[in-house]
Image (cartoon, grey):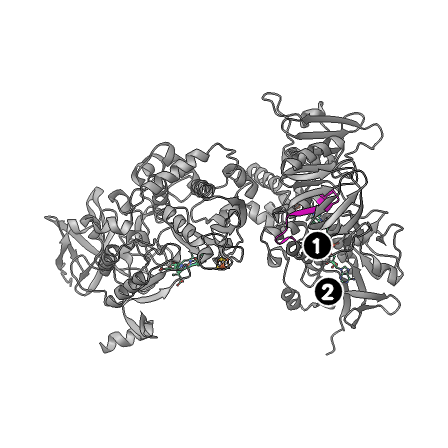
Amino acid sequence: MNSKPKQNLVIIGNGMVGHHFVAEWQKQACAQDWQLHIIGEEPVSAYDRVHLSEYFQGKGHSDLAYCQESDYLSLGIKTYLGVKASGINKADKTVDLDNGETITYDKLVLATGSYPFVPPIPGYQNPRSFVYRTLDDLDAIKAAAQGRTTGVVIGGGLLGLEAANALKSLGLKTHVIEFAPRLMPVQLDDGAGQVLKEKIEALDVTVHTQTGTQSIEHTAEDRLKLHFADADPLETDVLVFSAGIRPQDALGKIADIDVGERGGIVINDLCQTSDADIYAIGEVALWQNRIYGLVAPGYRMAETAVASIAGSEHIVPFQGADMSTKLKLLGVDVGSIGDAHAQTSGALSFRYHNESKGVYKKIVTTADGKRLLGAILVGDNSAYDTLLQYHLNDIELPAEPDSLILPNLGSNAAPALGVDALPDSATICSCLNVSKGDIISAIDAGCCSVGDVKSSTQASTGCGGCTAMLKDVVDATLEARGVTIDKSLCEHFEHTRQELFHLIQVNEIKTFDALIEKHGRGLGCDICKPTVSSILASIWNEPVLNQPHVKLQDTNDTFLANMQKNGTFSVVPRIAGGEITPDGLIFIGEVAKKYNLYTKITGGQRIDMFGAQLHELPLIWQELVDAGFETGQAYGKSVRTVKSCVGSTWCRYGQQDSVSMAILIENRYKGLRAPHKLKFAVSGCTRECAEAQSKDIGVIATENGWNLYTCGNGGMKPRHADLFATDLNDVELIRTIDRLLMFYIRTADRLQRTARWMDNLEGGLDYLKDVILNDSLGLGEQLEAQMNRIVETFECEWKSTLQDPEKMKRFRTFVNTDASDSNVVFVAERDQIRPATTDEKANLIATA
Amino acid sequence: MTVQVTKQWQKVCTKKDLVAHSGVAALVDGKQVALFYLPENDAIYAIQNYCPFSDANVIARGIIGDLKGKLVVASPIYKQHFCLTTGECLEDNTVKLGVFDTKIEDDHIHIAL
Ligand code: SRM
Ligand SMILES: Cc1cc2nc3c(=O)[nH]c(=O)nc-3n(C[C@H](O)[C@H](O)[C@H](O)COP(=O)(O)OP(=O)(O)OC[C@H]3O[C@@H](n4cnc5c(N)ncnc54)[C@H](O)[C@@H]3O)c2cc1C
Ligand code: SF4
Ligand code: FES
């Protein structure tokens, strides 16, 4: 049987919108009748350009990418990445590639985006000038900034300020040069621009407005000297142009399809160009004489084009898009909605300006004051979501519209627009075009948490700006249905871990029995007992094997050792920072030999000895403790290891003594119990040999001190740590870690490592920085005092246990005989023991 | 006809060997038994120490508690729960551990296999 030959659908451009097109296309029933071809000039598959700047915070292509090239291939899509389309022949319906190939199409989609405009200032072509658009651009900027001091951005718009932030994060003294009289001239008015400028200058970025660059000189020292009309010249090492974008429409001209006078490929409401078989979507497309420089409108175009090509019955024509934006630029809130400049005739403006706090808010209403036409916010975006909904849904404003932007001074609180007031058609997530109604339908279909709704509707998976709103809608909808969200720890406690932590701390509860009597019911179980035990240990730091706590412990804590699959235990002495003397090594070797234990170097830079029976643990540990070793707490939800690299003592690149710092940190926090285990690492320079960015707490030496990273994770769901603070001295570093760890211990859920804690923390990294670095909750001293108490009361659990005959009585394989467990059988492999497999065991026991 | 079975009580250890609200293991006639002690009602529960899910003798090291009104121990390796009085597994009703009678006489623990 001959199946129908497939039609060819060719997509030029694998950026954000090109990728969205492919993802939407794959959902179509007819997808299998078509052969897809993706041509992308960038060497890597599509990535999240909106979050490009995070590349400088340690994210790589894989973090930002929507998928890998292999994912396209496994869907049967042909890819040409790192290849540019150089021509289109609309008569033959072919596309020429710069690698010499020619592809035939039935339908063609142009998603070539835009390119940064570089004003032809004399001298603009030089090796120290860059643009800010692709990962390659960022790599080039990073390389050029290496060992240099100064950076300049030409252009004070939205992207220019993003670029300024990036230069700053590379350690450069940064300047922004703007031709207009204010920053972000398109979105802001003079008042707002001034507030933004002051805020940004407070961050040590110098802003030069109303400044035109006349020429650029490449000096003999390989720097650039910028000459201005009425200001002194400025020298810089790196120059980034961010003077606007232009549609990448060269192919349109080659193909001889309609191109706008000022650029952009002309499309109709179905996103078709003047040739009906060629579509254009995203930033390259010109709809009703407008280019949309945001990603959400591009996504809408992609969806329309997909439906049109697939011949769907439900085509939603492209009808323009809202250009409102909410951003954090260099940490400063900026929002702009609709007709921000009050250009509608008869429009009324209301302004609020607080110079001491650096807050500017303005709303623009219709002449009758009933509808919101636009708004501007700087320094405080809290009203953004509400204002946007008034604007988009044409909701009637309260009688005194200015109450929406006035500060909440007690009784005359601003009337917040509850989500109940929104119509079902209200867009909640504009990136993914999810309405309130879509969210309600998802809940009708069985979703019962924000997470469920997110995966079912994709809401909040774009820029993330709608997260708070989404949560409000989900909570309100669930609540309206009488669903109470059950946060109980288990059947014995109707509290979360965080609530229990508070109860224990505030009421000074010291035992599980006292807690369950007052706040729980029953006897407890293997969920609540270890959880409470961990909280008690975090707050009061009593030895976990003291009488009232014994019954609460997981086996590994009970026996201060990890149980292995055959019921034997492992022995892991602490080797702080991974540093060990030859004598220490020899000693461990001798103990292992004496008790016939399997030895292995662990992934945590220390030595694990396996195969000890319960009654052998005290004998082995007595020898280790006598020789000066301490418990490594490889068991328990507690501090594990601090990995180190060799650092400045030996390494030619080392900036600081990473080994000493690792040992200091390990000795400070050893014994600390937490909601989950904690891992640290300290690297001596950015080469990062200790892999600190995969740890809960990562420290990397700089020329001036230490950079602190947090909430990294290896394990099942790896997460890159976030850069938390830079250039700390030793004292600042320890203080910050003290606070961070204690705040985590107080607020995390049970068995939630720092990475998931951060993922779930409302307000995320910014909030955490506020609490820890700016002490916004006023908790700093308390957290430090609590940590000091734990550090001061540290004792080696093995040492104290060995001294207590009552505790020792548990370390017997049997209470009534000295016999060993006959079910524990070892065989030899590579000159060491290992547990016998079931078959091996059966044979060995039978022949014994 | 009825067969009269008399229980064979064996002295295993003293109360001092036990750990309140927790378990220890004993070897009785070559059989491993886990002994749990609840001081409130002076009760001792004896249950087989061998965990069939992990093929290891570890039940005595589990945490005890109550679930849905049943007194249980959680196996420390893969965390299945077993009822201390009947031996049944809450997660898999095809599995049941052996349970044994106990009594306390003059602070000595006796067990009948
Ligand atoms: C021994 C060791 C493997 C080795 O031979 O190298 C090991 C062994 C175990 N790991 Fe691990 N992990 C070991 C390094 C790691 C590392 C590497 C590291 O620390 O740099 C990781 C990834 C890094 C990370 O945690 O972010 C790692 C990620 C895990 C995870 C997944 C954690 C996660 O967040 O996804 C588990 C499971 C868990 O904790 O729930 C785990 C759990 C375990 C347990 C406790 C599993 C268990 O319950 O029996 C293993 C018992 C160890 C024992 O008996 O001593 N182990 N484990 C390593 C001990 C390091 C040490 O000196 O203490
Ligand atoms: C730093 C930065 C921050 C931003 N922040 C925001 C934000 O907060 N919110 C927002 O909505 N938008 C933001 N944007 C804009 C957003 O990234 C764009 O709107 C979006 O990427 C447009 O998607 P696109 O697919 O049309 O173009 P692009 O993502 O630019 O993709 C076009 C692709 O086509 C390729 N291409 C071009 N010509 C050819 C050819 N001839 N052959 C083969 N391939 C070709 C290009 O190499 C490119 O990979 C930001 C942009 C930047 C740079
Ligand atoms: S991280 Fe830097 S200092 Fe440490 S070993 Fe590697 S290269 Fe050397
Ligand atoms: S609005 Fe951007 S993710 Fe929802």
Q: Is residue A673 visible?
A: no
Q: Amino acid at mark 1?
A: Asp
The residue indicated by pointer 1 is A222
Residue contact between numbered discs 1 and 2, judged by CB atoms under 8 Å: no
In the image: residue A70, left or right of residue A587 = right
Please say if B19 is above or below A310.
above
Q: Earlier in the sequence, mark 1 or mark 2?
A: 2
Please say if A795 is above or below A6.
above
Q: Quadrant of the C terminus of chain A?
A: bottom left
Q: Amino acid at mark 2?
A: Ile
In the image: residue A48, left or right of residue A837 = right
Rendered residue at 45%/48% (across/down): A752
Q: Nearer the viewer, residue A323 or A181?
A: A181
Q: Position of residue A461 (x, y in %)?
A: 63, 49
Q: Nearer the viewer, residue A682 or A510?
A: A682
Q: Is residue A177 magenta?
A: no
Rendered residue at 28%/49% (across/down): A797
Residue A38's mark? 2
